[in-house]
Amino acid sequence: MLKSIQWKLVMLYLLVILVAMQVIGFYFIQKVNAHFLNSFQEKITGQVQVLTDVLPPYLAQTGEKKDQQGDLTYLAESFANVAGAEINIVNANSVLVATSGNMAFLHQKSVQSEVTRALLGATVETIKEDPKSGQRYLYLALPVKQGNQTLGVVYCSATLSSVYQTIRDITVIFYTGTALALLLTAVLIIFLSRTITNPIVEITKKAAAMARGDFDQEVEVRGDDEIGQLAVMFNTLRHRLRHALTENEQEKEKIEAILQTMSDGVIAVDAAHRILLVNPAAAKLLGTDETEGLLDRPIETMMILQDDDESLSLVASTHEFTLESSSGRILHAYSTPFRGDTEEERGAVIVLRDITDQEREDRARRDFVANVSHEIRTPLTTVKSYIEALEDGAIESPDHAKRFLSVISGETDRMVRLVTDLLQLSRLDAQRESWAIAPHSLRDLVQKASFRFTMQLQRQKVALSFEVPNNLVVNVDPDKLDQVFDNLISNAIKYTPEDGRISITAARVSGKHVLVQITDTGVGIPKSDLPQIFDRFYRVDKARSRQAGGTGLGLSIARGIIEKHGGQIRIDSEEGQGTAVSFTLPVATGGA
């Protein structure tokens, strides 16, 4: 019932009236209460004041005479009858000399605090509640004075029950009238609210019919007020909505005809990336001729996103990216989001174009650039470290300066060789790479590679040690093997925390091969990542790999070089316990 606008109006007006009446009633009752209490107090005070004016001659007489006692008692009872209260007359010694109440207390000393204060010359007036009966009483004590001398006190106590009863009667009358007024007002409001709600109810019913698809509804206009204007606007809206729906149907038919004849693929998806619409060209690119079978399927089941952002949201903004279909075709996609009234109604339109051949060429170029970036970074770091050392003062020492410049010169030459070798990376896969394989001391190669990382190890606070016998001679290309050491030692430094250790060991394991092992105490590699660790561009921790400068090609290049030497490489690791990289190299003919 409270969902109806009519009852909401009724409740609203009744609440307003009720609040107003409550405010008025509170103010009225407070004023009535104050008025009756003040009137009663003024009446009692007036009577007691007259008595205090009469008593001085009686209380000034010394001794107690029988006539005096009788006069005082007469005065107390007379004024008590007029005031409707109990009158007690106390002399200057706090002794009760006359009372209109219980005569048993006559000639006893009064101990009331009001009497004591009044004997000091003060007028005392207070209201107290009797804890036994719950009745409230007015207590009044006025001093009887002759000049500046206090001769005694008139102590009066009067019940307030009649006053509060009168106030309660008035309150009942007031709230009864209020309830009758609210009842009559409610009836009137219900009658008047129907003149407002009935037209609104009619418009609501017509709108509900339109929501169900019936656009033949029309509201009767009953006046020129706001409700009448609403009815006019409703009828206008109905005509315009019907016209708009007709135009939408025509536009839909045009779009469907265009989509059927387009050579590019077009797909529409919702906010959850489920396919809403697909044209025949898109279905063909996805490896099927049935467009109906693709509807309501997640687009990820038909395409593999090649974008770096794995959490790509097509409905968030415009994107241009590459996709791989389930049939293996590489597609260029351009997505544009469309908005809806709710989050569920949002979506995106994706236009697809087959760029498989072009992407293969671009991927080869990207691989080449990535290799160059990764392989040239380590020599540049070494050169920069020694230049900084020279700038920091090592240049003042001829021995150090000559040594550092020699290293810089060697690293520069090595960068030239690396660039030359990386330009031949494509020839490596095509079996056209040239190799300068010759016998070399493995210890010299390891020592040379380790020395290049001296500055970096100091900055990272990582210790590096190696144990390689002097008599181990391997048949290798030294520059290619330098690349392997550079990649593996660099990775070990990157993923080993401060105060960690890196060790390089080598031993002859057979008559033809030497086993080299590089072990660190770093963060390790999860077991789930080990099978793909040598794949190109594969990174265990993508965010950290980028921050550390890795491209995901180092281990792949190292494996290629080792395998070209006729050896094998493997990685054993446990997350949080460190990593051990082992590879074999051919022993030089005649080597120890």
Image (cartoon, rainbow, N blue to C red):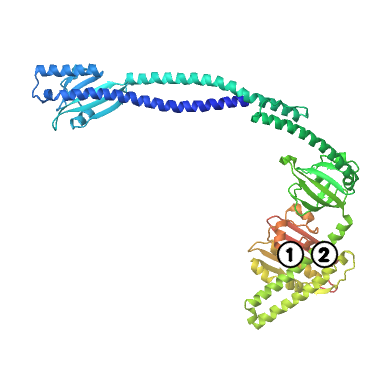
Q: Which amino acid does label 1 sit on?
A: Ile
| Side of 352 where 347 appears, left or right | left
* Viewer-nearest residue: 469 or 201: 201
Task: Find residue 145 and report its image quarter.
Answer: top left
The total number of labels drawn is 2
Q: Closer to us: mark 2 or mark 1?
A: 2
Q: Evaluate whether residue 474 shows in this view.
A: no
Q: Which amino acid does label 2 sit on?
A: Phe
Q: Residue 518 carries which label?
A: 1
Q: Where 352 sits versus 585, above or below?
A: above
Q: Position of residue 161 (x, y in %)?
A: 33, 19
Q: Evaluate whether residue 290 shows in this view.
A: yes
Q: What element carries label 1?
A: strand
Q: Where is residue 298 in the image (x, y as percent from the top left)?
A: 80, 43
Q: Position of residue 51 (x, y in %)?
A: 19, 22
Q: Where 346 sits versus 65, above or below?
A: below
Looking at the image, tell me whether mark 2 or mark 1 is earlier in sequence order: 2
Neighbour tally class for label 1: few under 14, some 14-19, many 20 plus, Cα within 10 Å: many
Determine the residue positioned at 59% across, 27% down. 8
Determine the residue positioned at 68% across, 75% down. 386
Task: Find residue 274 and report its image quarter.
Answer: top right
Cα distance, mark 2 to mark 1? 27 Å
Q: What residue is shown with label 2?
A: 368
Q: Which mark is residue 414?
A: none
* Viewer-nearest residue: 364 or 180: 180
